[in-house]
Amino acid sequence: MSKNEDCGKSAGKSQFGLMTTKRFAPFFWTQFLGAFNDNVFRNGLMIMIAYGAGSLLSGKSDIMVNVAAGLFILPFFIFSATAGQIADKYEKSMMIHRIKIFEILIMVFAAIAFYFNSVSFLIVLLFLMGTQSAFFGPVKYSIIPDHLKPDEIVGGNAMVEMGTFVAILLGLITGNSINPIKLSPLWIGTALCLVAVAGWKVSQFIPDAAPPSPNIKINWNPFSTTWETIGYARKVHSVFLSILAISWFWFLGMAYLTQLPNYTREVLKSSQDVYTLLLTVFSAGIGLGSLLCEKMSGRKVELGLVPLGSIGISLFGFDLFFAYSSPSVDHLMGVGEFLKSAGSIRVLADLGLIGIFGGFYIVPLFAFIQLRTKAVYRARVIAANNILNALLMVVSTISGVVFLGSLKLSIPDFFLVIAIMNVVVAIYIYTVVPEFVMRFLIWIITHTIYRVRHVNLDRIPDDGPAVLVCNHVSFMDGLILGGACRRPIRFVMFEPIFRIPVLKFIFKTGKAIPIASRRENEEVYFNAFDEISKALDEGELVCLFPEGKLTTDGEIDEFKPGIEKIIKQNPVPVIPLALRGLWGSFFSHQGGKALTRLPNRFWSKIEIHTGEPVAPETVSADALRRRVLELRKDYK
């Protein structure tokens, strides 16, 4: 990871530090208690249908369980688009208060329904719970960027994902422990009401979040509104592909979670306690993977973790197929007996690692959507995400029926099929949006060869045009700077460097601008200046290496006057940077040409130092060189 030593007013809290702030902690606990209550209610209902009302349902409990699951998902199709409009139109903390009051009312009626053993009324209430969740979803994810700083977005999303899965797990365990078959219905009814009231009380401490689009007119037609909402999601192609990638994750998650009970009973030959153990390991894996994202990404949105996540999901999904052979036992094994059986630890490890890599996969995608979507319609884009998530969850359930029922596959066979499907989907997404692969390559390179420490990187503005200037030490300079900065950077690259295999893919995908001297290639020279001007006009960040070539002696050569020409045409701030510690690496010219000798060091410590922005009217090549020298000092 990059060891962040940024010090400035924009430096934010770590993900655990956020739990001490009013702008995040009340929201986190509101979300946590809501997810917990959802699952206590749903599990209590499912147990009542399966075990307590069998005589009333005349053996149709399996049908009722699926009907109940469908009724919980249905509101996401009907109401998500409208919920997105409302979340963009009204103040969000007020919306959360009202949604939590609605939850209290539902839980009061649920307590009555549990007491009177009314399954049909509980199923109606489950639909209302789904409706409440559909309205909460767009508010939940759109309020995060309103209250968190850019370098807190990943950590905030990680905490929310971790908290959600922990709450789901605890809700399932609690719902099982106090279900109305084992204990008096008063227990579960009282618990549901108390948790709902606690969630409402905590929500009162959530700070206000001004509505981004107060003048929009609510369209109550669910069909036209849904189509319009999907249109907002498609405005930015990479955002829409990220939504599809998240929806695919829920396809996989639903497939594993739906089959886990039968997998435990039929393949592992084990009891419900073993199922709880597997569910705990899987959920804990997602929570741990989510929390690791902040550390592994250097507190910025790191899309390079998404391919890493999909690779891990597929790899350990494949291994789950081979991990276990059903033992010859005539009873369901308990936890102790299961753990002694061959392959049990491998199954647990596979599920845990699928969860961990799932965390790597999902957290950067949510953060990416929040940051790349304009605030004025962010909630509607998140509503579109919820609609597509629900759709893929339904498709996942249908796929399970087709593969396991119609095609007669075993559950391990089904796990193998979805692992293969994940590879195919990943290849498609990364082919259409190569930015994911580009960032993955950068992340791999900068986390295996180097340890990067950066100082005052917050001096680079979070938006608006600016030019970065830096000393040029190695072929890795652009990748290291690009991997450290939260914003995409348009690098101006010496054309021979731009053409290096592998690096060319990264530079081209990152929309680098190749340049040559006017004498060597006049057309490339003028095209480069036109492209730089266009990028700055569009508010982008451009990085130059004004020396024009790699240093051959470790010293900083003179800065070419091209920087003055650029700033004269586009008067924007210039931020000086200095790379320290790269001289002598395999990719530098020390001791001969770069790339021509064996590497002699790995995981080297290097530093990026950022200077104060220079006003455009005071920019000169010589003055910028002196500033970079001051930043670099004697550390090459």
Image: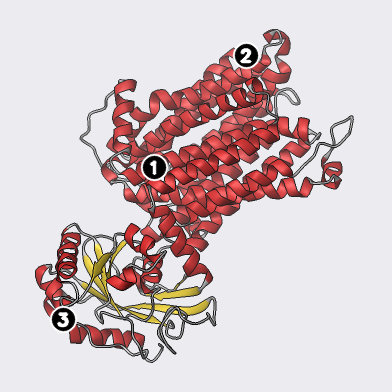
Q: Amino acid at mark 2?
A: Ser
- The residue wearing badge 3 is 561
Q: Reading the chain from its start, which is encountered first: label 3 or label 1?
A: 1
Amino acid on which the number 1 mark rests in the picture? Leu
Residue for point 33% across, 32% down: 230
CB of mark 1 within 8 Å of CB of mark 2?
no
Under mark 3, the amino acid is Pro
For this view, does 98 lie left or right of residue 235? Answer: right
Name the residue that disc number 1 marks.
241
- Residue 311, compared with residue 518, is above or below; it is above
Q: Which quadrant would the C terminus be assigned to in this image?
A: bottom left
x then y, percent, for residue 181? 74, 22
Judge from the rendering whether residue 560 lies leftward or rightward of residue 607; answer left or right. Answer: left
Around disc 3, counting alpha carbons within 10 Å, would you say few (fewer than 14), some (14 to 19), or many (20 or more)?
A: few
Q: Nearer the viewer, mark 1 or mark 2?
A: 1
Residue at 18 percent across and 83 percent down: it is: 621
Please tell me which residue is depicted at 64% across the width and 28% down the height of the picture: 43
Point out residue 307 in the picture as x, y percentages from the top left corner.
Answer: 49, 52
Residue ID for mark 2? 118
Front disc: 2 or 3: 3
Rendering coords of residue 78 (x, y %): 40, 23
Choose the circle earlier in sequence order: 1 or 2: 2
